[in-house]
Image (cartoon, helix red, strand yellow):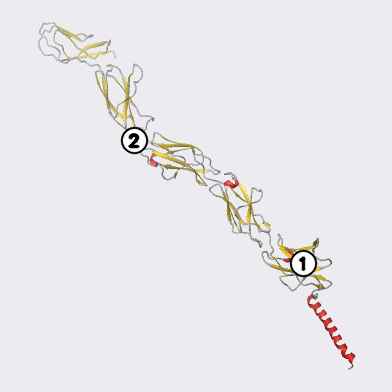
Amino acid sequence: MNKHTIMKIPIIIIFFIFVFIIFFDKKNSTIAEVPGSLEVPENFEASPDDEGGVILTWKTETDLDYELSINNNTTWTKINNIQTNSGIAAVNLQLATYNFVMGTTYNFKIRSVKDAITSNATQNKIAIPRKPPESPKNFSSTPNNSGDVVLSWVKPNTNGNEIKSYKISVDNGDFTIIDNTNSETLTVTLTEVNYNFVMGQSYSFRLLAVNDAGDGAISVSSSAIPRKPPESPKNFSSTPNNSGDVVLSWVKPNTNGNEITSYKISISNGSFTTITGSSDSSLSATLEKNTYNFVMGQSYNFKLLAVNDAGDGASTSNVSATPDIPPGAPSNISVVESNKRLNINWLDATNLGSSIIRYEYRYKRNDSGGFNNWTSNRLNKSVSLTNLENEKKYTFEVRAFNTMYGQILSTSSRQYGPHLEIITDKNLPSNRLNKNYQTSIQANLNSGDAVQWSLAAGRLPLGLTINQSTGNVSGSPTQAGVYRFKVKVKNNK
């Protein structure tokens, strides 16, 4: 082998090896890297958009293509649909194409490509794909008993980004942020004061969650009617009746958006209990003595409140009443008649109420006007009426009082008249035989009365007679003896 032959062998071998390497790389990696042949893309950044994709940006060079590696995958893919503006390239890696898992961290790097020559890769840039949250689940709105509305829900899928707050729409209005809400919030109270709720008016609510990607999907609508317990009944009063009961009356209060279901009463600051049969339309109630065990003549305080589905309302102030039953009429009136006098007695009145505190009486002469004034007789059950006119008719009334003043009181009335009576001593003067005798028999006559005297029983002494007009007995007795006889007098009454 000569010298020239020896020199050719290395040249052939080197050429062969170079060609083999090029061929081998083409078979396994598409394009072989030639370090330093192309510049590494500058200012490369990766950031999530708000729709689950990732936006890549970098400083671009003219006539270059670019390839992408995700999570250090050795397989590089050409980047298509690059948008260029003022030397800055941008591409949106859309969720639909790359199937990103929301909230998962991804590494991105790119390299330049031209005429089968590639640059070195950029440094990895991290991006976490995200989307606005899905709609809150199991959303509900419930009124509480203070005029507020309580919202509750199950946390939605956050789509890879923590929830920052929630927004509410009332009656399809604009969505506004609910203060102090975050990813852990699952319930919130919309207060009457902040949202100006009108009690009894229906409101619809919609909810959405917010994260860094923006406003999420809207929940289904939920309705609620804010409510509060009723206000205090107005013009509340308590009045005893004549049966020992207490009658309550009031003006219907503001119901605060919910129909009144009943009323409750407190007696002498005791517990509130439901008034049986009371309802939204009730404006009065009778508290029966047997139901409430009232003691007649004892004062009681009463407070009233209304109830609706929101609970017990505000109570009234105390009002008072003294249940009592008027006494019956004094019974068994008896009269003893005498000259110009009536002595009247009666028994106790029938009394189911408080103790009798006094009796009063009055009377009138039937033929001369009305009654005189009522006169207290204290607790005495007898009275003597004097200076009356005999043989005149009188009406007498007596009534009993207990502690229930100003109520209808019982009366009794009867008609009586003093008797016409002979008032001369029954033992008439004595006389002698055949001597002139004269005496006058007197009666309790009223002035001007016309009367007729007569012998009622027995006989007068022989020789004596009685004057039918004057009652005088006169004559001369002709036979001695003791004579017993009765006379009677009658007027025109």
Viewer-side residue, 103 vs 410: 103
Q: Quadrant of residue 298?
A: top left
| Vertical relation: 196 (above or below) 133 | above
Could you tell me which quadrant the N terminus lies in?
bottom right
**Marks 1 and 2, how far apart at CA:** 108 Å
| Vertical relation: 476 (above or below) 43 | above
Q: Which labelled disc corresponds to residue 186?
A: none
* Residue occupying the point 41% across, 44% down: 270
Could you tell me which quadrant the C terminus lies in?
top left
Q: Locate residue 69, reporting x and y percent.
A: 74, 70
Q: Locate residue 28, reporting x and y percent.
A: 78, 77
Q: Locate residue 181, reporting x and y percent.
A: 60, 55
Provide the residue designation for mark 2.
354
Q: Locate residue 359, reporting x and y percent.
A: 31, 28
Q: Is residue 109 left or right of residue 463?
A: right
Disc 1 + disc 2, Cβ < 8 Å: no
* Residue occupying the point 77% across, 63% down: 90
Circle 2 — which element?
loop
**Nearer the N terminus, badge 1 or badge 2?**
1
Q: Badge 1: how crowded within 10 Å, few (<14), some, or many (20+)?
A: some
Q: Is residue 201 left or right of residue 466?
A: right
Provide the residue designation for mark 1.
42
Q: Is residue 184 visible?
A: yes
Q: Amino acid at mark 2?
A: Ser
